Amino acid sequence: MLNRISIRVYYPCMNKSSPERRAQILGMMVEGVSIRAISRMTGASKNTIVKLLIDAGNACSEYQDRTLRNLPCKRIQTDEIWSFVYAKQKNVPQDMRGQFGVGDVWTWTALCADTKLIPSWYVGTRDADAAWTFMRDVASRLKNRVQLTTDGHRAYLEAVDGAFGTSIDYAMLVKVYGSAPEAEKRYSPPVCLGTERTVIHGNPDPEHISTSYVERQNLSMRMGIRRSTRLTNAFSKKLENHIHALSIYFMHYNFVRIHQSLRVTPAMEAGVTDKLWSLEDMVRIVDDWETSQQKGVTRMADIDQDGTEDGGVRFTANTAKGDGWMRKHYKSIDVSFDRSELLEAKAFRAAAEAKGLTVS
């Protein structure tokens, strides 16, 4: 007997910007323009822009997770790029310290050196658990044995071994740095004096032990994502919006933006698509995702062998008499709870009645 619950949330048809306006806003998001600047330039409200950020982030993430599979990559480079959310680590309030999503946040990226495709990225900490999650995802998307190059971060060692085993040609590239010129210590990077190449697994080609492409991609991210630009007051206030912005950027980078050296997009070079996408195509992906959400999110109900619901509690909240907030967001809510969730059912009823809704 299945032991699941069924949840349906129906969204009303709401006014939204035209596809052209939405494409314009998405284009600004991936070209280093801030939310407030987009609002001033387009006349759209900040709430409208943030709503599009959230919907587009979810849509782009789901689409790429589904399509970037069985990839023919041969050489992969990975790196981690630092940013912060809410506040810099040293300024995080004492009661929020240790909470992920407040302070330092790292984005792990993998790049195919041949097609320049970004097949995988992961937002998390810079520890062994994050490395493990990231490398497992990278391995799940590749069709062939690949040559992998990482920096000298020790967390990669066990993560790569666990994700690929011996079916990989893996090397580490460690850069040796000197000190920056005395007058430029604050803003200039230290001088690179040389590199050390260490073979970890397999037989990697020494000529292709490099992280140059993925490190150049870090610069592209800082230029294209306003909240990642250094030495400005632009930063993410919420982790969720930070992730959404990355999803949109990578979607545009993989499918829409023509790579200067390839003359096509990375997705075309990798065989993921056979056409050049436009921002309007991205908008259609977002529209399709929003339509799927309007139809509701449904999982299998708790059904017994005779096909009848097994002792569940069902509530339907009619929003016709609700306050403005609820009428704006929902037409009706149809939620099922099984017998083990009676406390949740009571809490739902209390919350709905507090909004002035009719609950049956």
Image (tube, rainbow, N blue to C red):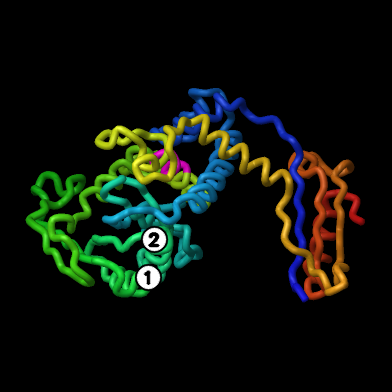
- In space, the residues marked 2 and 1 are separated at their CA atoms by 8 Å
Residue 217 lies, with reference to residue 265, above or below; the image says below
- State the residue at coordinates (42%, 66%): 133
SS type, badge 2: helix
**Residue plotted at (56% across, 47% down):** 58
| Residue 320 screen position, x and y as percent | 88, 41
Q: Quadrant of the N terminus?
A: bottom right
- Neighbour class for label 2 at 10 Å: few (<14), some, many (≥20)? many
| Three-letter code for the amino acid on which mark 1 is drawn | Ala
Which residue appears at 78% of the width and 65% of the height? 301
Q: Residue, x 73% and y 56% (percent of image)?
A: 298
- Above or below, 52 relative to 110: above
Task: Quadrant for the C terminus, please.
Answer: bottom right
- Residue with the mark numbered 1: 163
- Magenta stretch holds residue 323: no
| CB under 8 Å between discs 2 and 1 | yes
Q: Quadrant of residue 324?
A: top right
Query: In the rendered image, which residue does mark 2 sit on?
Result: 138
Image location of residue 63, percent across then percent down: 52, 47
Magenta part of the chain = 248-253
301 shown above or below 121 = below
Q: Which of 289 and 239 is in front in this view?
A: 289
